[in-house]
Amino acid sequence: MTGAPSDGSGEAAADCGRGRRVLHLVGEVVVLLWTLGVFWYYYESQDFGELVLHLLGRTG
Amino acid sequence: MTEIGFALLFLAGAGGTGHAISRRLGASWANRIEELCFSVAAGFALLFLSVLILGLSHLLYAPVIWGIVGVWAALGCREVIRYKGALGESVRGLRLRVRSIQLWLLALLVAGQALGFIRSLAPPHGAVDPLAYQLALPSLFLSKHYLSFEPTVTGALYPSNMGLLYIVCLAFANGSLAQVMHWLMGVLTCLALVGFCGRYLDRRSGLWAATIFGFVPIVVFFGPRGYIDVGLCFFQLMAFWALLNWVVTRQLQMLVLAGLLTGVAMGVKHQGIATIFLGFPIVVIAGVIRGRSWSETLRNALAYAALALLFVSPWYIRSYLMAANPVWPLANEFFGGMEFGHAPTVLSLPVQSAEGGDRLWGLIPFLDWLHLRWPSMSPWSWTFSPSGWQKAVGVYFAALLPALLLYCREKRVYLLAGFCVAYYLVVVGALHMNPRYGLVLIAFLSALCGYLAGRLYSSGLPGLRQVFAVGFFCTGVLNLCWGYFLARPVFDVVMGVESRESFLQRHEGNYRVFQYANENFPESAVVLLQGIVKGFYLQHTYMWDHRHQPILSYEACRDADDLLQVMLDHDITHIVRMVQIPQGRLGFYPQYFADPLHEAFRRKYLKLVYRDESYVAFEVNYPAHS
């Protein structure tokens, strides 16, 4: 039971802001993982590995 | 390499004359890139109009075209010299700093476009649509000196503003120049995305958007060829951009520009009609939301539509005069136009499938249709299992669009996303579920994804932006590998190590038979092309036998003599035929050598004069009394 009521609401607001920021950062991590995963799956499924090896074989 | 010089000349002509037009209109711009893009679009519109007038006046002679285009280019260059400082500002507008991600994005974009440019310099080869009609029709128009009606060639009466540009290219140089100009439309679209994002989204997102668009497989694959779809995309993008400028600024000049550019887009291809179908409601909704009176709203909407229709109307009038249908052969049953072989469908309406009849989803026709057609319209299958390059949208949309859930906090982003959804419905419902026909959707999605990529890159979590940048850069490098793979076969011919003749003999299946025909058939020969025989390289009068043409019909033929009469009716002297029609194309052509009627006719009346592994040429032996 410390602090004035106004301090309490300020703390709650700060908590809420912190919570949102954390949620947003988690969201960004999820989006990044999704993006990288789709990148990987796409180039894997479209046989880009073979294409690169083919090109390296030709030029190397 | 003269193509490079001519392309630069045309660019200067378009930019300069368009700048003079926009200056006279009194339009004001948010940035130099925007000014440059609108100038180029307006300048090309002026060129289209000039060549259209020549074509309708039977004046398509090379010297006349040189004269008109020369004056246009000279006026443009004069304006460019007056405003050359502004061009420098456009480049500085990108605000590139060494070690910034923007510089890396630019490097990827330039490298990708350079590979496309190399491909565009090769002689036109391989692709069916350009060699069968998108380049073939301009070549026929040029040889006949007017916009003739070639009823057996696909798209004979379609509007064709890009075709007018290709006539100029063929008059000045060759088909490679036409390909360079189509590739240039892709570059201009990338530039326009930088300007558009700079004005409406976020200055940093422009280069992300341009790089994403530049690496979309449809653009990479079709851009450096003599198609017209990337050109349509550029003019549609400019039309919508002008409309948005009008909505935001209420500058009347922008509504005028939007109307004119909508007309230009509609005149590139019938698929451009989608511009006015979305543009008109946008003008009305903008008026209603801003509390304007109904009379003012209606006046603006009608003015916009009237300007658009004014610019496209010469094409519709031509089509009406030739075939009694302004959009022949579309909606032919409505207009009662000239008979057409196999009428194309326009709308993909929900219908009950045979499969759905005994399944749960079959109870609701829409769900049944959705279940049946989902693989054709699903962005997921456009990404991972597209049926052909024209549906291959690439990886960036599936990878980045989910980030909307995180970053869609602003009205402008909601509006852009909403517009993309509306245009996607247009693509699904009216554009054969084919993203190549609605590339402007891909351009706006690129803008959206560019914005999302920019936001992800400016993320607050340490290390996250670097991981994302490295991932994105890897995709760029892989795309460049693919671009290199596509460009490698043309290196020799582009660098002059191999002659164009020898290259075409190896890479264009039709070329050898047409070489023979050009050298050996008499001047007066009329050639019938049977199968996938693309007429671009044939220098004789020709007709193309396929199920969409209304001229040659075999249905009434009972025997070889009836078929001979059909040939006689059209003065056909020679036939060039594909030996083996591929299985997937048998709906469009008969398997001539297995068809009893055509075989009986061949034995009785055709004399083989040329053959290679893929094509044969016959001379029709008419009996002396016929």
Image: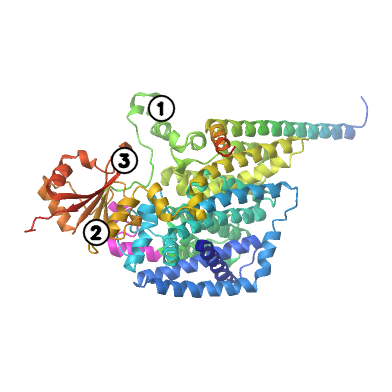
Pointer 2 or 1: first along the chain: 1
Quadrant of the image containing the C terminus of chain A: top right
- Which residue occupies 58% across, 48% down? B112
Q: Place residue B142 in its image quadrant.
A: bottom left
Q: Is residue B484 toward the left or the right of residue B585 in the image?
A: right
Q: Nearer the viewer, residue B157 or B372?
A: B157
Q: Quadrant of residue B252?
A: bottom right
Residue B585 is labelled as 3
Indicate which label's residue lies in the foreground, 1 or 3. 3
> Which segment did they paint magenta?
B313-338
Q: Nearer the viewer, residue B321 or A16?
A: B321
Q: Circle 1 marks a residue in which chain?
A: B
Q: Residue at x 31, y 64 (%)?
A: B148
Dots 2, 3 in contact, CB < 8 A: no
Q: Position of residue B167 (x, y in %)?
A: 41, 64
Disc 2 marks a residue whose amino acid type is Phe
Which residue position is annotated with label 1? B361
Q: In the rendered view, does B351 fall on the left or right side of B473?
A: left
Amino acid type at circle 3 is Arg
> Quick one: SS at disc 3?
helix
Single out the mark in the foreground, 2 or 1.
2
Disc 2/disc 3 C-alpha distance (Å): 28 Å
Whether callout 2 and callout 3 share a subunit is answered yes
* Label 1 Cα crowd, 10 Å radius (few <14 / some 14-19 / many 20+): some
Please check whether the numbered discs 1 and 3 fall on a single chain: yes
Given residues A7 and B606, the one toward you in this image is B606
Front residue (pair B372, B220): B220
Q: Position of residue B138 (x, y in %)?
A: 38, 61
The kind of residue tagged 1 is Trp
Residue B502: numbered disc:
none
> What is the chain letter for disc 2?
B
Question: In percent of the image, x 87 and y 31: which residue is there?
Answer: A8
